[in-house]
Amino acid sequence: MEDTDKNRTPQVLEVLQALKQASQELQHKHDNTSLAIKALLELHTESDTILSNDPNLSALSHHLSRLKHLVDHVNSTTSRHRPHSLRSFLSRRLSTHSISKLANSIESEIQAWIDRESIHSLSRHLNDHLAPDELIALLTQFRQRLSQGFNRDLQDLVLNNKIFSSLESVLFDAKCSLNVRENAGLAVAALIRFNKDVFVGQVLMGPTIRALVGMGSLRSIEALCSLIRSIKSPFVDEIESNGEIPNIIGFLDCEELEMRVLGMDCVLEIGYFGRKEAVEAMLKEGLVEKLVELQRSELGGDLIDLDHEKKTEEEDENDCDEDGQVREGKRQKRFLEGHPFASCVARFAVMLEVGEGLRQREKRAFKQEILVRVREASVSDAEAATIVAEVLWGTSL
């Protein structure tokens, strides 16, 4: 019986999505003979067998009965009165408005039905670890649903079905494929964006941080950066206390360019939100020295030099009509696209300077330490002078 339920879920969801689309169309198109009307009225005719046995669907059944009554009323009014009479016109307008409002209520009830089916299916797949392709599709759909904004009924479904703990189990299960675990991590990050207050405690107390850093993949680091931005300093505190700072700094040494770039993004986020202990841990791991080396590479460079360069031929003519600050911002963005580690030492220093995690005296002390480390790591006086100038004056990014 359980296998039958699993097999029917995708078909049920497909039908429900079509009915939801029909209710959306009905809010904008009010032709009484439209396919949207026919689809919803067909659901009404089946309501005795489909809806009557489920108390969660009683409101939908009521709305569909009301829709049939309104459609019948419009049809009878049109047949009794001349189509262009004032009475017929006013009756149609009133009924059209009522149908539009009702269609909105029907859409909400169908969405709630979709949510119940989706969450129950996701819970089953997370717990049995079977059909990874279906699980990934369900996780993707789950993230998309969460991105639509807070919904209390959806949150209750997530809590009642223990979705968060199931996601963490998958995250830490080496038997699951990397793709499944990555998608579970992205779903955790989406839940935090959905309602941080409810789910943040579970993230901080669970294995999420170790699992994401341990995977060391592009999407796991994307999820980690998203969690840092959402939870801020408390999450960075946990990263530091779990001893994960050295592993994150290690991403800057990866052969894969995208991993190094994401590692840089993660470092900048930690710099912005991190407290004294986290920043100290990064500096002890030789972060400044690594950043100097990256800035020296072909993918590095100095944004400060852009002030002395002529505009390239690729700058479009419209740039000439914009103010200097906008043009400069566009030039820097174009340069960073090809040189992701340009001025990375100064960019890190700026994040500390404007960030939320440090006291003012700590910011000053770390700035001085960065300058000392830059001078020691530079291969020439010219390189040291350029980077020091950028750190001292800051770089507009």
Image (cartoon, grey):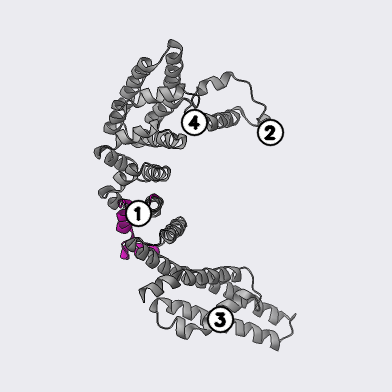
Q: Are marks 2 and 3 in contact (CB under 8 Å)?
A: no
| Whole-number angstrom distance, CA of label 1 to CA of label 2 | 51 Å
Say whether residue 394 is visible.
no
Name the kind of residue labelled 3 in the image. Glu
Name the magenta segment's main secondary structure.
helix
Name the kind of residue labelled 2 in the image. Asn
| Whole-number angstrom distance, CA of label 2 to CA of label 3 | 56 Å
Give the residue pinned by disc 2. Answer: 318
Name the kind of residue labelled 1 in the image. Cys
Is 174 contained in the magenta span?
Answer: yes
Name the kind of residue labelled 4 in the image. Pro
Q: Earlier in the sequence, mark 4 or mark 2?
A: 2
Q: Are marks 4 and 2 in contact (CB under 8 Å)?
A: no
Image coordinates of residue 287 in percent, x first then y, are: 35, 27
Give the residue pinned by disc 1. Answer: 176
Q: Earlier in the sequence, mark 1 or mark 3?
A: 3
Q: Are marks 1 and 2 in contact (CB under 8 Å)?
A: no
Give the residue pinned by disc 4. Answer: 340
Q: Are marks 1 and 4 in contact (CB under 8 Å)?
A: no
The segment highlighted magenta reads 154-178
Q: Residue placed at 69% from the left, 78% from the top?
A: 89
Q: Disc 1 or disc 2, which is closer to the eye?
A: 1
| Whole-number angstrom distance, CA of label 1 to CA of label 3 | 42 Å
Q: Disc 4 or disc 2, which is closer to the eye?
A: 4
